[in-house]
Image (cartoon, rainbow, N blue to C red):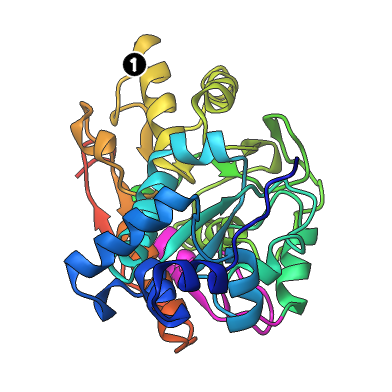
Amino acid sequence: MTKTKLTLKDVALQLGVSTATISNAFNRPDQLSKARREHILAECDRIGYTGPNKAAQILRKGRSNIVALVLADSIPYTVSDPVASTFIKGVSSILQQQGKHLLLYAGDSESILDVVDFVDGFICYGAPRNYKLAEELARQSKPAITVDFDIEGLPSVNIDNYNAAYQIAKKAISPGDQVAILGLRLIESPSTCRIYDSPLIEVQTSISHRRLDGYMKAIDESEATISNDWVWHIPESERSFAKQAAKEVLNSNPRPNTVLCMSDIIALELLQSALSMGIKVPEELKITGFDGIEEADRTRPNLTTVCQSSALKGEMAAQALLSESLKSTVLPFDLKMGETVSA
């Protein structure tokens, strides 16, 4: 025999209290004394009532206290990346303070439409692998903010990636240098490769292309040289992909004497490979990174890099979304002059 599901009214009648009191016990504990709330919850547990229907509440009130964080990549990759995981901590710290919940949504998912009705808003961290998600995000009506890329019509939280790349490159490059660039997600390819004349992806929205433009301006102004076969595309800021690019650049003939890397993970893999080959850094090879992760400062020689606060970036994005003061924000960055570039 199927057991009849208890309704809020049923429970209120059995306990001899109002439906509002039952609802407050589950959803607004500050409205009841601790003892009264605990008594009501214990009685509900005794009769098998687990609380008001959450889906119905969301549809009725239009608010779920859930924020969706749409990621650029898969969830396992994102939480293992030091920059992305620090960003997530920044977001979650603000949401937790405000009694909100975080839903991680993979960037290679088919659609965001299945969760639109059940979240209060979206933070989109990086251009999703499935760019259809960004297009859906632009069309839906919930509050949304992007981080580390742009969607026309939506506010964003970024640093000035063009200027940061330009400044770090100017610190590293000397006249006559032969320069290579280890780029991140520059073209549509799942493999590490040189870009040659391949069409760049989503130039208007990608922070990687802004970094590339900043590097190229610095190279031109510094009277250094670079050829299009010395620009590498690395699909993810992950050591196995970076290791292949490092091997190729270090075995080039002639070999570049300055390499600009679009992440610290890439730069650290290049540094390790160079040292294992007996290449002196920075005397024979200058290396720059981007991000300012802790490992970049611990390694020896420590890394010359652009430092940005991923935690602050996450906090600012969450605060903006919750306040519904949705304005674009450009955060500061610092240059960390380490030992991988000559003083």
Nearest the eye: 303 or 179: 303
Q: Which quadrant is home to the C terminus?
A: top left
Residue at the location (42% across, 17% down)?
273
> In the displayed structure, does residue 231 sit left or right of residue 321?
right
Residue 249 lies in the magenta stretch:
no
Say above or below: 130 vs 74.
below
Mark 1 highlights which residue? 275
Q: Quadrant of residue 195?
A: top right
User: x, y (%) of residue 218?
Assistant: 47, 60
Residue at the location (56% across, 40% down)?
75
Say above or below: 189 vs 123.
above
Q: Quadrant of residue 57?
A: bottom right
Nearest the eye: 25 or 115: 25
> In the displayed structure, does residue 252 sit left or right of residue 26?
right
Q: Which quadrant is home to the N terminus?
A: top right
User: x, y (%) of residue 260?
Assistant: 46, 43
User: x, y (%) of residue 73?
Assistant: 62, 44
Nearest the eye: 154 or 342: 154
Q: Report the span colored magenta.
A: 141-168
Q: Is residue 180 visible?
A: no
Q: Is residue 49 visible?
A: yes
Secondary structure beneath label 1: helix
Residue 165 lies in the magenta stretch:
yes
